Image (cartoon, helix red, strand yellow):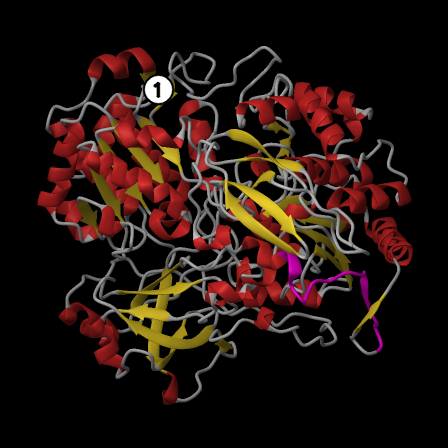
Amino acid sequence: MVEQVEGTRTHCPYCSLQCGMQLHRRGRETTVAAWEEFPTNQGAMCRKGWTSTALLRDRERITTPLVRDPATGTFRAAEWDEALDLVASRLADLQRRHGHDAVAVFGGGGLTNEKAYSLGKFARVALRTSQVDYNGRWCMSSAASAGTRAFGLDRGLPFPLRDIEHTDVLVLVGSNLAETMPPAARHLDALRRNGGKVVVVDPRRTATADRADVVLQPVPGTDLALARGVLHAVVAGGWVDQAYVDARTTGFEQVRRDVATAWPELTERVTGVAADDVRALARMLGEAENVIVLTARGAEQHAQGSDTVLAWVNVALALGQCGKLLSGYGCLTGQGNGQGGREHGQKADQLPGYRSIEDPAAREHVAGVWGVDPAGLPGRGRSAYELLDAIGADGGPKGLLVFGSNIVVSAPNAHHVSGRLDALELLVVADFVMSETAARADVVLPVTQWAEETGTMTNLEGRVILRRRAVSPPQGVRSDLEVLAGLAGRLGAPAGFDTDPERVFDELRRASAGGPADYAGISYARITDEHGVFWPCPADDHPGTERMFLDRFAHPDGRARFHAVSHRGPAEQPCGDYPLYLTTGRVLAQYQSGAQTRRIRELGDEGAFVELHPMVAARVGVGDGEEVRVRTRRGTMRAPARVSTTIRPDTVFVPFHWVGANQLTNDALDPASRMPEFKVCAAAVEAASDGPVGGVADADASTGAADGLPTIRPRSARPPARPATAAPSASPLATSASAVDAAVTSPCAADADATPGGVDG
């Protein structure tokens, strides 16, 4: 019988709010109840949270290791010792033949702090490979890069979420808060009740826009240009807080000169936002006492994502808002542990405590905690997409271990990435269900899920919280910590790997001590007593840092940095062959790759859709609900049309929770953050009945492969060749019907360079 723990206080398995909840075990059923005392959500949850326990009894749960038979391509059950022995021997053989970097590790932003920390330690100590990164690179990295450059430190929100209720103006750039984290949307309503204003910047008019006072719908990929235009108008209107700029910042004069030519009329030509609206927003911000600017993936998942965030930070700094109560800039982190997951070592360039792996002092400190020679620690490795692009290729890793990520659905240019996975000599996936990525593996290791394990998470506010084990896992399932310890022992690792989460966290505290993300003063006991502790918290008697930068910023001189940034536009521009912008995002009932939420009957799974404007629908001859084909330079997909006047007529939208959307997206990278350009590329739409098109075979996204056990086929030896590419067109489409028609009939410009890092110069 399953162990029973009544009334366990824990947290939701999904987004970065990490809503508090109580789990009650009654017989075979585990039910969710509100935990009203937890401050972030105060008992409120979305439908995903309320139904989250359904996944604990999913009939497709993997409960035994699976090993692929190389002769038939099918999986067979294996004992744990056999599976771990096989994986360890194959890893050792690959490294013996090709060197330490022949093996790579890929983590996830949903892993607990303990697992993320152990994964990074495992890569550097047990495998001694530099080839480790995680899927959070595709979520918050642009905001993290910009925050570090502007403030000297990245913590998504430098203030608690409740502060937005009491500001005067809240600007949401690229965030559909009402659907991606619904319990947080109540803060927008409270702000408006208190007399404040909400501004939403998004190419689509979303459910969040319905809660706003001002809605601006720029051309996809032009948020940076809009920010520059707003700052120009702020300067022209005399709303710069010069005393603040002089006392707390550097670099403003260069930015002032840089935006002198970004007049609102030019901004209108680039973004499609009327010049009068640009000036009106500048006036609203300039006349407000308190302003908060929040960015999310819509602004950040671009080849200029870091610069886009910096442009909006420039606006907040010029207004004197950062490092001030009820004001400032923040990033709405997406994944459940998107904040903590980027702090403790599973990134290619990082050691625990948000330390740089290239800093000799950091290497010495962390190596001392691990009991190894700092000279033996590898250096910086490839970023997430660059790592996946290299696997199976000459000079790239030959083996890959995946923890907490469904790469086949979530990676950009996913058809190409799937081919790279198939080129590996060894693919090992740790998961609790047969995801699309696990279905391609050589070995699948069944691991625990959220309610079956204890561990800390760090939510979007920088609040470290504690998930508690509420039920026992099924027989035959192990935790990720046990998997890592089992492999490390077999590989002869020189350092120990604990399997007890609290002891691992205590080691993490020591490793992070003195670093930018200092957890030294945080303990399981304090988290329990205080409903979470904000980092940095360097000592047991330190209260934690709920609000950052009130006295000084984290740069050595205590000042924030302005950065002059220019708008280049998306790496791909529309043309005659691909006349529309494609953008992607989430929907209310699903989460990330859908591997979890698509299995929950109560949430429903209506499949993907293509949202398009009535003018586009009329042009291609389709009605609402009729199937359309979306084409980009990387692939095609089919899904029903959803005709809506709330999207720009030059833009189509596809949710990314199903196979298909990311077979279309562009893998051009931000030069600073290495973020792929998920949020905009050139696309064409046609009625699916028009017949087949060339290029990659259609991905039928009407249902997800995870709705039933995926078909297991032998993995191919080599991936398909990548399509040839060239340079982009220059001008964005206008929003009129005549402009759409003109684009359809105009000659196509040469294609954009969609190779990794193609926008780096």
Q: Is residue 663 above or below residue 48?
A: below
Residue 218, horizontal then vertical, whole percent: 23, 52
Q: Is residue 220 visible?
A: yes
Q: In the picture provided, is 702 more to the left or to the right than 28? A: left
x 64%, y 23%: residue: 525
Q: Is residue 366 magenta?
A: no
Q: Is residue 632 above or below residue 191?
A: below
Q: Is residue 61 magenta?
A: yes
Q: Is residue 663 above or below residue 23?
A: below
- Region of the chain picked out in magenta, as a range: 56-71
User: In terms of secondary structure, what is the magenta stretch mainly?
Assistant: loop
Q: In the picture provided, is 177 more to the left or to the right than 68? A: left
Residue holding disc 1: 323
Residue 474, horizontal then vertical, whole percent: 76, 56
x 83%, y 49%: residue: 95
**Tag count:** 1
Q: Is residue 523 visible?
A: no
x 43%, y 12%: residue: 557
Task: Please identify the quadrant where the N terminus is shown.
Answer: bottom right
Q: Is residue 601 above or below residue 390?
A: below
Residue 379, horizontal then vertical, whole percent: 69, 34
Nearest the viewer among 664 and 522 is 522
Q: Of helix, strand and loop, which one carries label 1?
A: loop
Mark 1 is surrounded, within 10 Å at the Cα level, by few (under 14), some (14 to 19) or many (20 or more) other residues, namely many
Question: Which of the 4 quarters of the picture holds residue 504?
Answer: top right
